[in-house]
């Protein structure tokens, strides 16, 4: 099978002495002796980019971003510390990417490892791009079908609206989110507030799991990757909406 960008990224980062890969917040990170020099990020919070975030030396970020904004950007979180974002699927030469990774590695690697680097290899560039659904799984056929049905349910409630938070589709009762769709490890789940007391009961069913970040506030996630009981989803959505809705919304709901 043809190599994709993800495979080329690993070759580009792991040829360096003692470089290793680990997973952080769902993204592959590359480090040497505990210090991260590169992060591979796809569609971070819905930005649509296929990118490397590199621990660049002082001044490199400003130089590259101003000169070539098509290929470079300031990444979130680490950008204020000088990190450089490199967009991988807009035609930038792969040997140049490898050289930038090497510079990032040299910035954090101990001096004793510098002498072991040797000549920068010619990394074989990817033969195929990531598909639209690989970049944004919410654009897959399954996700579009699920979101269409969930949208119909959620927007039927008074003063409800649809938006996006950190790349996840969300629905709000007024200003408060009551439903969310999220992807994690290729699994699509729908999240609703049920209360902490109900979480333990629901997680006895393997389709349910407590989602990160919001789970401690009483939220639950229902796996709908392959199938979905829409009557069940409608009950969860309504319960969650009632929890967050204002009195006037609940009054309108009764009259509907």
Image: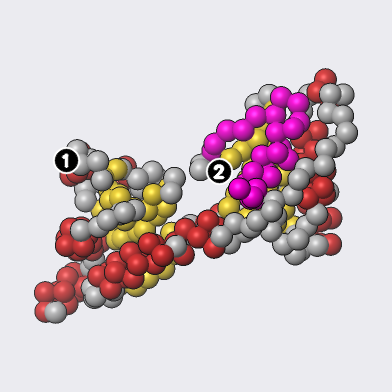
In the rendered image, the quadrant that contains the C terminus is bottom left
Q: Is residue 127 left or right of residue 142?
A: right
- Asked if residue 219 can be seen in this view, the reply is no
State the SS at label 1: helix
- Between 13 and 54, the one nearer to me in the picture: 13
- Between 131 and 146, the one nearer to me in the picture: 131
Q: Residue 185 colored magenta? A: no
Q: Could you say where residue 40 lies in the image, as x and y percent from the top left? A: 63, 45
- Which numbered circle lies on residue 178? none
Q: Which image quarter: residue 138?
A: bottom left
Q: Which residue is mark 2?
A: 27
Residue at the left extreme of this rendering: 254
Which label's residue is closer to the chain start, 2 or 1? 2
Mark 2 → mark 1, Cα distance in angstroms:
31 Å
Q: Is residue 175 left or right of residue 35?
A: left
State the SS at label 2: strand
Q: Residue at x 33, y 70 (%)?
A: 148
Q: Callout 2: few (<14), some (14-19), or many (20+) C-alpha neighbours within 10 Å?
A: few
Q: Which residue is mark 1?
A: 201
Q: Which image quarter: residue 156?
A: bottom left
Relative vertical location of residue 87 with respect to residue 58 in this rendering, above or below: below
- Asked if residue 90 can be seen in this view, the reply is yes
Which segment did they paint magenta? 1-24
Q: Residue at x 78, y 57 (%)?
A: 92
């Amino acid at each position: 099978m043809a190599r994709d960008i993800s495979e080329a990224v690993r070759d580009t980062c792991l040829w360096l002495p003692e470089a290793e890969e680990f997973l952080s917040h769902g993204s592959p990170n590359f480090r040497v002796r505990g210090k991260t020099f590169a992060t591979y990020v796809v569609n971070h919070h819905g930005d649509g980019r296929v990118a490397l975030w590199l621990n660049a030396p002082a001044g490199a970020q400003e130089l590259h971003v101003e000169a070539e904004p098509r290929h470079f950007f300031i990444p979130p979180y680490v950008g204020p510390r000088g990190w450089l974002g490199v967009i991988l699927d807009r035609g930038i030469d792969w040997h140049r990417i490898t050289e930038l990774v090497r510079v990032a590695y040299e910035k954090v690697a101990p001096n004793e490892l510098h002498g072991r680097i040797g000549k920068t290899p010619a990394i074989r560039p990817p033969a195929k791009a990531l598909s639209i659904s690989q970049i944004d799984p919410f654009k897959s056929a399954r996700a579009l079908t699920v979101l269409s049905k969930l949208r119909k349910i959620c927007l039927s409630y008074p003063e409800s609206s649809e938006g996006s938070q950190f790349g996840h589709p969300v629905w709000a009762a007024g200003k408060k989110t009551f439903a969310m769709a999220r992807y994690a490890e290729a699994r699509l789940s729908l999240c609703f507030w049920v209360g902490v007391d109900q979480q333990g009961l629901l997680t006895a069913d393997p389709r349910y799991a407590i989602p990160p970040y919001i789970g401690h506030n009483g939220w639950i996630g229902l796996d709908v990757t392959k199938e979905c009981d829409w009557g069940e989803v409608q009950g969860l959505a309504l319960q969650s909406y009632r929890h967050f809705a204002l009195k006037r919304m609940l009054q309108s709901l009764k009259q509907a």
